[in-house]
Image: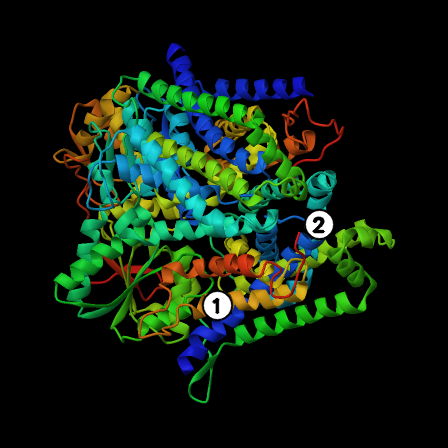
Amino acid sequence: MEQQLYGIFLYGVFLLTMGGIYAVLTLGLNIQWGFTGLFNAGVAGFFAIGAYTTAIVTSAASERHLGGYGLPVAAGLVAAMVASAVIAWGVGRICIRLRADYLAIATLGIAEIFRLVLKNEVWATNGPRGISLIPKPFEHLPEPWNQVGMLLLVFAVVAVLYVLLERARRSPWGRVMAAIRENEAAARAAGKDVERLRIEAFVLGAALMGLGGALMAHHIKFIEPNAAEPVSATFLVWVMLVIGGAANNRGAVFGAILIWTIWSTAEILSARLPPEWAVKSAYLRIFLVGLALQIILQRFPGGIFRERRFRTAPSSSTREQPP
Amino acid sequence: MKKTMIAAAAAAAALALNGAVATAGEVKVGSAAAVTGPIAELVVAIVNARNLAATHVNEQGGLLGGDTYTLVPGDSQCDPKAAVDAGAKLVNVEQVVAIIGANCSGATNGMAQSVSIPAGVVMLSDTATAPSISELDDNDLVFRVATSDDLHGRTLAQRAWDHGYRKLAVTYATDDYNSGFAEVFAAAFTALGGTITGNEAHEPNKASYRAELATLAGAEPDGLVLFAYYGSSGITILRNSLENALFGKFLGADGMMDNSVIEQIGADNLRGNIMLSQPASATGSPPYEAFAAAFEATGNAPDAPFVAHSYDVSFLAALAIEKAGSADRGAISAALREVANAPGTVILPGEWAKAKAAIAAGEDINYEGASGPIEFDEKGDVTGTYTLNGVGDDGTWTPVM
Amino acid sequence: MIEFLNFYLIPGLVLGSIYALGAIGVTLTFGILRFANFAHGETMTLGAFIALSLATFTGWHPFAVLPIAMALTALAVLGMDRLFFRPLRHGSTIILVIASFGLMLMVRSLVQLVWGAQLRSFGQGIDLPWVLFDALRIFPKHVTIVCAALVLMLAVHLLLSRTRAGKAMRAMADSPDLARLTGIDTERVIVTTWIVGAGLAAAAGVFLAYDTHVESQLGFKLLLPIFAAALLGGIGRPYGAMAGGLVIGLVEELSTYPWIGSEALVPPGYKTGVAFAIMVAILIWRPSGLFRGRVF
């Protein structure tokens, strides 16, 4: 029994670590969508750039892929954010003028092209075989401290991001962003350089996605193109943000952990089925996840946490979701 | 509203945890497989083969003092993120003694490095062929009966050369299994003195490959070496090649070995034109036939990709637990080598009662698997035996010389 | 030259007509219901499997059971709309996108539960082509697919141009507010949209399955090129979607032709990327698509 409880504790640590990494991604998406109204459907692309950057920077030398500089994890995390930001700046320069749905489809396409590059440029990324032996922080500590250490690191990152983003939301910069989202023409008329501000939000969000990807690479100690496929690296993040509540940082974190918990624990239920169902139980689990999504969406069509309006804002009573 | 949701969640959690506690008389082993995801169509038979081994164990006296051998499913989705999550559940919530799986090399790698090695749980892979698995710092916890692509690729190149091929075109699916294989094959074939007229990747799951094939056929090679899974691109490529008379001769590996290939393309179209290398004991050898007969009796095809390996890992995990004498994670690694490696009383697939009696009598045993003799080296790898298969007169995969 | 026709142009046309049928549904839902329907690919898979079961059960040719399969798929999609989209219709569109994502997961796993994940196919063996002029290779199945696709596109054209329901659909795709003001019954238009979109998706699924094989991820794998086709043609423009589908199908195949020297122009590993690259380029330089669709 004691062993059982300890096991459940350890699983809880894994669950929250993964949920926390998704929270970093969701916070990044929240800057883009929630605060600025940029429909980025290419989360997986920036996730992958971050993950591969840190893998190349921190892993030991290998002839299978580029780099292998063996730098500390912290350097990897910073490099991941910088790389994602730089590429996001380039993408943003080209695409930022597109309207919501069009931006979504463009970013989705760009992310898929990134994934093809990761698969095909074998000299740099080892292609579909991926990069192995990525160092994990605290991995040399005895169990459970190795896993708990990783969890604390992820939580510390989420906490710092949350505080900074809350501050940014209330800052003049955050208010201008909300203004652009609500009424772009008015913001333009007020003399704001809308395009530049949007690129800023896009780049900042992408940097966080890169950070999320890097944390994931260190957590699973391995990265390959399949890890950046759109279902679990883009759409799932969107589900988390929309269900948690767009434009609300607390909602973004809560949504990430809630949806990841549903995604993960559904399997514990489906694994209870008799062995003849060993294959079907996995399908059933995905069905249950889809159904849970629909139920939550219908119960909370505006997300579980609503956007918190500025006290100074005119109290237009019923506001729709972002555009 | 909130209350009902919380209540529902609590009920679900209680149910899950209640089930998770091992009932007395049960030994759990995690069965991690990519049931959903890009290779879903391959994995059905793989899971069936693993379950067959469990049935054999349970029908012939069970584990240890008559306990049930239970395989707990975990869906690795061919994605290392999902695999780590599935592994964390198997190791911690289900408290499995060991893990078999997790299919794709990347998923296996992630699960091993992040979950099973730190927890001291043995992982026994049936299908991970990437060389990087051998390089893991694994405290002797990661084993596999799938052979590394390195060896398989070189063997296939030699066989192709022996069959008189000198100029070959290569196409491979951009996944971890097939791309590495193609690289090794091309290098080895060139080293033998052969010519690779073209070596092109193809993106799986497209509706047509006529354009790629026409480009490759332009250099007029003797045949096409096709590294693909039959479902995601292999059958389409065969069909496109034959229908358009682009290629007539094919070489490939076990990712293509499935009855559906013969069913869909037609035995007459393939007979004499295709050779696939499969890392398994030769058909006709006692270990393979023991497995094949039993697997066929359950309505499955024994020559589907990797099913022999999947049966073996499931059976081996049970043998190791029996040998260790307890469902203790720490004892599995050493026991696994003892039951798999020579010398000892030879045990064939399905011979659980015999193995159990031999272990009880204190004898050393040596499992000869459906996938090969299975002798683990210091890295936990095996040296494979490979069989070259073609389509026989009866329309099934049959060894060729 | 003849190789170009046989191996690049004709396959591109076949693939293009399948994309076109799928893209009509996407563009109509996008234009009329205002959201990108991620479950559209699963509709194709569902249609293909329904047709497979009907064909196995009756022993008829897949094209003979196609109308029934289209009708059943449309019925299933109407049920999904009632359960999962209608309750959310008055919220923001992102909620509908997320709901379609949830539905995608549900339909795919249902298909896997009912039909399994293994490959199935309508026929066995290989077809040999008709060889014309000693060089041109034409496959009977490709002729039937392209002809059937043309018939369906003609039917869509007649529906849109000759019937009240079709005109109402076009009006709503152009300007929903105006359409509502002129007294168009929006719920009815939505029902028609789903029926047309789902029926064509089922047909596209069956055609692809007839050309290759069917498995549970058939539709999902087509989803992104179909989005690209819809966008290329201009959102809300069914004729644009037809053209867009053909263009994407052709360009994907033609990109690997050795235009310069003897090497493929685009390495085949990047073939899928071509559709996305075109899509992004169109978005940037001509966001209304080739056929001047709506720009939101």
Residue at image point 29% right, 41% down:
A131
Residue C186 in view: yes
Q: Mark 2 points at which residue?
A: C33
Number of the label disc, if any, that sits on residue C251? 1
Q: Where is residue C183 in the image (x, y as percent from the top left)?
A: 87, 53
Numbered disc total? 2
Q: Is mark 2 on a helix, strand or loop?
A: helix
Residue in the foreground of this view, choosing between A19 and A241 = A241
Q: How is the image coloured?
A: rainbow
Number of the label disc, if any, that sits on residue B158? none
Instruction: Give the letter of the chain under mark 1.
Output: C
Q: Where is residue B114 in the image (x, y as percent from the top left)?
A: 32, 29
Would you say C163 lies left or right of C246 here?
right
Residue in the foreground of this view, choosing between C51 and C156 = C156
Residue at the front extreme? A191
Residue in the foreground of this view, choosing between B308 and B65 = B308
Would you say A228 lies left or right of A246 here?
left
